[in-house]
């Protein structure tokens, strides 16, 4: 059984991060094909301590809001897929709920990020949120395609973490 603001989708279990999540995150975020988009130069590459910090921050997000980033596994077999869900962030100087997504390179292009995004949007609606946003580097075509498939609309090019990013949003009414 999954708890409030966790989700079961066609292929995925979208779960509140737990004690083992830092190691799971490391398996995905340390991959060069993932770092390339989340830690592009001049940002420093992820260091070992970042995974523990990320998992701790995600658990604290849940403690504070009752929802948050998901540690995502395949329903069949339980392989760790990546990180999705909802995350409060400062975007262009405003507090916004962002849809984060990162998928293990071995499991990409199976529709998993889109499945996570759609489940996160559903969770955002249930939580009474009015808007979600997503950001991508302009040349991150896979991420832009996920935004498009999940129904987000282009808003503007903005600076985020010191780099030009495309901002997309979905109005939840
Ligand atoms: C972005 C990411 C999460 C997508 O995960 P995924 O599970 O492969 O996504 P999906 O399978 O749901 O959809 C990917 C779509 O992008 C397309 N795509 C993949 N690589 C592409 C590329 N280089 N150029 C254009 N389209 C591409 C796929 O064909 C697919 O579209 P389709 O269904 O129309 O064929 C994954 O690539 C990833 O983890 N990247 C590194 C981290 C990252 O960039 N996170 C987002 C930061 S904004």
Image: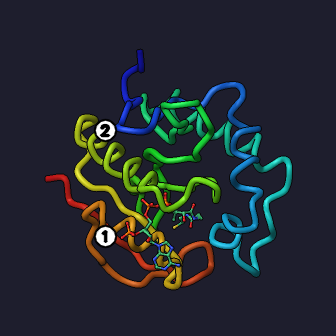
Disc 2 or disc 1, which is closer to the eye?
1
The outermost residue toward the front is 76
Residue 109, placed above or below residue 50: below
Which of the two residues, 76 or 53, is positioned nearer the viewer here? Answer: 76
Residue at 38% in and 56% down: 114
| Quadrant of residue 42 within the rendered picture | bottom right
SS assignment at label 2: helix
Q: Position of residue 100 (x, y in %)?
A: 49, 55
Task: Specify the label residue 148 is tagged with.
Answer: 1
SS assignment at label 1: helix
Drawn side of residue 166 relative to residue 171, left or right: right
Graded by Cα atoms within 10 Å as few (under 14), some (14 to 19) or many (20 or more), the crowding at tag 2 reads: many
Drawn side of residue 28 relative to residue 46, left or right: left
- Quadrant for the N terminus in the image: top left
Residue at 49% in and 62% down: 109
Which of the two residues, 19 or 56, is positioned nearer the viewer here? Answer: 19
Task: Specify the label residue 123 is tagged with.
Answer: 2
Which of the two residues, 145 or 70, is positioned nearer the viewer here? Answer: 145
Q: Which of the marked residues, 2 or 1, is nearer the chain's N terminus?
A: 2
Q: Position of residue 110 (x, y in %)?
A: 46, 56
| Quadrant of residue 53 within the rendered picture | top right
Residue 32, placed above or below residue 10: below
Q: Position of residue 79 (x, y in %)?
A: 62, 37
């Amino acid at each position: 059984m999954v708890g409030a603001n966790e989700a079961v989708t066609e292929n995925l279990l979208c779960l509140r991060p737990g004690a083992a999540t830092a190691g799971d995150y490391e398996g995905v975020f340390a991959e060069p094909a993932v770092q390339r988009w989340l830690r592009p130069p001049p940002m420093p590459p992820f260091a070992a301590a970042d995974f523990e910090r990320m998992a701790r921050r995600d658990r604290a997000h849940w403690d504070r809001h009752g929802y948050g980033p998901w540690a995502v596994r395949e329903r069949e077999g339980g392989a760790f897929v990546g990180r999705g869900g909802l995350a409060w962030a400062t975007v262009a100087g405003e507090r916004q709920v962002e849809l984060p997504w990162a998928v293990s390179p071995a499991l990409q292009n199976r529709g998993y990020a889109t499945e996570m995004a759609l489940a996160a949007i559903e969770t955002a609606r249930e939580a009474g949120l009015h808007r979600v946003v997503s950001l991508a580097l302009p040349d991150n075509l896979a991420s832009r395609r996920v935004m498009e498939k999940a129904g987000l609309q282009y808003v503007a090019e903005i600076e985020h973490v010191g780099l030009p990013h495309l901002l997309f949003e979905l109005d939840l009414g």
